[in-house]
Image (cartoon, grey):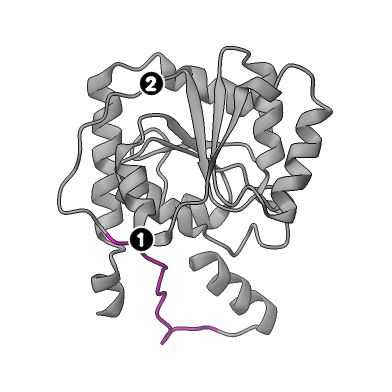
Amino acid sequence: NKSTRNELEKTFDIKLNRSMIVYNGAKIPTCFTFKKIKFNAISYFGTFLLWKGVDLLLKFLQKNDDLELFLYGNEKSPSANELKKALLCTPGLQHRVKFKGFIAQNCVAIELCKNTSILIIPNKVSSYSSYSTPLKLFEYLATGNIVIAPDFPPIRELIRDGENGFLYKAQNIDDLSDKFHYIKKLDSKTLNKIARNAFETAKKYSWENRAK
């Protein structure tokens, strides 16, 4: 991404004029699927490593007591067990957090296409933040989902706030909650326009275009 290139130029005092940025990618469905967005739950797909920030979603749930959290991933992993311990220490959330289990990679896109809840990327500020673009972001966009992602530089290269997704101040639960409730007020036509914009954005990052 551009953030990595800029940092390389700054660190080594060079100009990478003959460089090319090759982003990650995703398999793109043949067509956009209209979604009827529901606001009774949020979903997360992926690993439960602490730097991924899934524990922040628990704090988000505490602030929004009418929501459930659906977690798709390996619920028997060490990081999942740590998350379950955190749940036990957080009264009132156990019945609102649902572990949906592991999904094989070749089935992830199918599940994402069927998804009708808001998808939040909760990554925390870390040494990766300025250089890493989550692969799940490409998959979320490709399947026409409404995404709320932290405003890290690499993510801002893909997400235009309010146009093809939404940004929030990283690790700021209040800002995340405000953004969620702003989205909740949007009508279905506007939401699907944003979802379609996400799908159109992802087309640029298909594996076919990446290979070119």
Quadrant where the image shows the C terminus: bottom left
Q: Which of marks 2 and 1 is nearer the N terminus?
A: 2
* Residue 138 in the image, given as x and y percentages of width and height: 39, 55
Q: Distance between the residues labelled 2 and 1?
A: 25 Å
- Is the residue 45 above or below the residue 117 in the image? below
- Is the residue 170 above or below the residue 206 in the image? above
Residue 171 seen in render = no
Q: Viewer-proximal residue, 203 or 50?
A: 50
Checking the image for residue 38, the label placed there is 2
- Is the residue 176 above or below the residue 13 in the image? above
* Residue 31 in the image, given as x and y percentages of width and height: 15, 48
Residue of label 1: 106
In the rendered structure, does residue 190 fall within the stretch colored magenta?
no
Give the residue displayed 40% in from the left and 80% down from the top: 20
Quarter residue 21 falls in: bottom left
Q: What stretch is highlighted in magenta?
A: 15-27
Residue type beneath disc 1: Asn
* Residue 107 in the image, given as x and y percentages of width and height: 35, 54
Give the residue displayed 37% in from the left and 65% down from the top: 25
